[in-house]
Structure formats: structure tokens, C-alpha cells
Image (cartoon, helix red, strand yellow):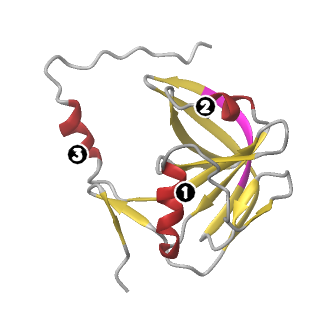
Amino acid sequence: MDSTVTVSPPSGLDVRQLRRTLGQFATGIAVLTTRAPDGTPLGLTINSFNSVSLEPPLVVFSLARRLSLLPWFETAEHFGISLLSVEQRTLSDRFAGPAQDRFAGVEWFPGPHGSPLLVGACAHFECRNAIRHNGGDHVLFLAEVCHHAAFAREPLVFFGGTYRELAP
């Protein structure tokens, strides 16, 4: 079954205003990671992460087609997702910035399948690259959760174009 659907935006749709409107949905911030064939850790900040199913255990995220790291994630067998804690705002900015050596000086450890997982995160997931779908200017990844862990830390939240903290 072909899962590709082409949707044309309504004429006159203001894309900037749409982005601001979508920004009214508070999200957590995560760093998505994998390794290059030579073992070099690769990663980037995402906030398009969500749960899909418990049986089977699936999560979803999307990556822009223009991303230079996209081919690495499309071909990776596994990848890691570290949900950032409020103390990790600088990591969010670092992994969202220019793709230099984002891991330089960053504490991380390999998950059971070798994916880099960031120390100090609220939660970790290690996932198998299961299904990809066309999502317009993005690629949607449905990933099977192979390993997960949660920690008692406050999450980093993004809302209205800025970082936020949850009130007690």
C-alpha cells in the first residue's frame, strides 16, 4: 500500500503564521542520535517526538528533508533519543546549531544497541529504525522502542518560540 499523500496548501496560507500557531503546542525537547559507519556519534535537536503505540512499542518523529544528517538517520539500524532536562538547554542549542563536532565535551554513553545517549536527560529511548513515510518537506520516522529508561528530572519545554520550565 502506498502511504505517500500529496497535499497542496490552501492558497494564501501564511506559512510564518502557521508556524507561530503550531508553536502554541508545548513540546519537550530531545536530541536524536546515531553513529556513522566509522563509529562517530551524530546528533541533532528535535521537538517533533511523540508516542504512537504501546503494542508494538512505537514512537514518531520527523526530520526536514534539507538536513545534512538525514541520510545517516534514514540508513541507521538504531538510534537514540534523549529527552532533555531543564538543565540541558545549552545542549539543545548546541545540537540545533551548526553541525560541527556536537559531541565534543558532552557526556554520553552507548545504549544496548550502541546509540549515543546523553547523561543528565529525563529519559532515554533506543529505537530500531522501522518505518519511514513521506511527510511533505519532512520524513516521518516510526521507530520501534527497544530500550528505555526514565529519571526523576524536570523536562526542558518549548512553547511560543522559547524555552520554558514547568511550574511546581
Badge 2 marks a residue whose secondary structure is helix
Q: Earlier in the sequence, mark 2 or mark 1?
A: 1
Residue type (three-letter) at the residue carrying disc 2: Leu
Label 3 – label 1 distance at C-alpha = 20 Å
Q: Is residue 29 visible?
A: no
Give the residue at mark 1.
30
Give me the residue at 46% from left, 68% from top.
156
Q: Main secondary structure of the magenta part?
A: strand
From the top left corner, tell me how far across and down residue 142 is, in percent: 63, 37
**Position of 146 relative to 76 (above/below):** below
Give the residue at mark 2.
70
Give left or right: position of 108 versus 159.
right
Judge whether residue 127 is colored magenta. yes
From the top left corner, tell me how far across and down residue 107 is, in percent: 70, 68
- The residue nearer to you, when weighing 139 against 68, is 68
Give left or right: position of 37 versus 68.
right
Badge 3 marks a residue whose secondary structure is helix
Residue type (three-letter) at the residue carrying disc 3: Arg
> Which label sits in the foreground, 2 or 3?
2
- The residue nearer to you, when weighing 108 against 21, is 108
Give the residue at mark 3.
20
Give me the residue at 85% from left, 51% from top.
113
> Callout 2 environment at 10 Å: few (<14), some (14 to 19), or many (20+)?
some
Figure quadrant of residue 39: top right
**Position of 133 relative to 7 (above/below):** below
**Position of 166 relative to 146 (above/below):** below
